[in-house]
Each structure stands twice: as structure tokens, then as C-alpha cells.
Image (cartoon, rainbow, N blue to C red):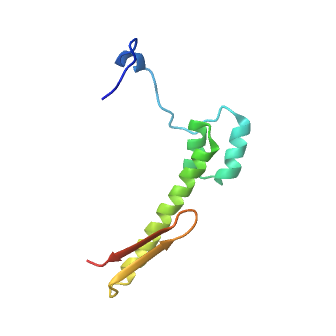
Amino acid sequence: MFTYQANESWSTFYFPDFVPPFETTFTNSTLESLAKEKCNNDRLCLFDVAATERIEVGIATMEDVEIINRIEEASVERKKFNRLEVCIIAIESPLSLKLILPFL
């Protein structure tokens, strides 16, 4: 459901020639330098900074990917302990996450 102002309709926001960016392209060389420094060559971080022009968005993406990777690694470790009844996964800073999962 969309709500339009009195002088708007779907055609106000229809841009058939729009092509979303698929490459990381910076229009600001200062931002590009800062992004390369802060993102540590992480391609998702660099893309998000280039697309949003906000360094904090790229850094948040990079941190989220790191958390996901740590959870996946812990899941692999969980599978190794097939005789235990409970698995505890603890992830610290910047996010604290503790899962206690019974084996099925």
C-alpha cells in the first residue's frame, strides 16, 4: 500500500531508464580514500559507502558480515560435539549473542 501526496501518483516515481549500480563507483575521492582505510578492502563495505556516501553504513555492513561469519563458524563447531545435549554459542563485542540450542 502506497500513499501519495495530492499531486503525485505511481508515475511520479516511475523511472524506466534507471539502472541500479552494480559496480563500486565513488564520485568523491576523499570519501573513497576514507572508505578504503576503514573498510580494509571489504568489497561489501566499499560498495555500501559508495552507494550511500555514508561511511557508517559500510562499516555496519562489514561488522554484520563478521558476526554472521562467526555464527557460521560456531555452527560448524557445534556439529563436532554430537554427544552433548546443549550447545552454547557466545559472541562478544560489538554484539553479544548467546544461544543455547538443544540437539535434535
Outermost residue, left side: 104
Among the 4 quarters of the image, the one containing residue 53 = top right
Q: State the residue at coordinates (38%, 75%).
A: 100
Where does the image place residue 82, in percent across and percent down from the top left? 33, 84
Q: State the residue at coordinates (51%, 34%).
A: 21
User: Could one spot residue 70 in this view of the protein?
Assistant: yes
Quadrant where the C terminus lies? Answer: bottom left
44 or 9: nearer the viewer: 9
59 vs 89: above or below? above
- 31 left or right, relative to 89: right
Among the 4 quarters of the image, the one containing residue 103 = bottom left
Where does the image place residue 3, in percent across and percent down from the top left? 35, 24
Where does the image place residue 48, in percent across and percent down from the top left? 56, 43
52 vs 40: above or below? above
- 92 left or right, relative to 84: right
Q: State the residue at coordinates (58%, 66%).
A: 93
Where does the image place residue 16, in percent across and percent down from the top left? 40, 20
Outermost residue, front side: 6
23 vs 39: above or below? above
11 vs 86: above or below? above
Q: State the residue at coordinates (74%, 38%).
A: 30
Outermost residue, top side: 7
98 or 25: nearer the viewer: 98
91 or 15: nearer the viewer: 91
Quadrant where the N terminus lies? Answer: top left
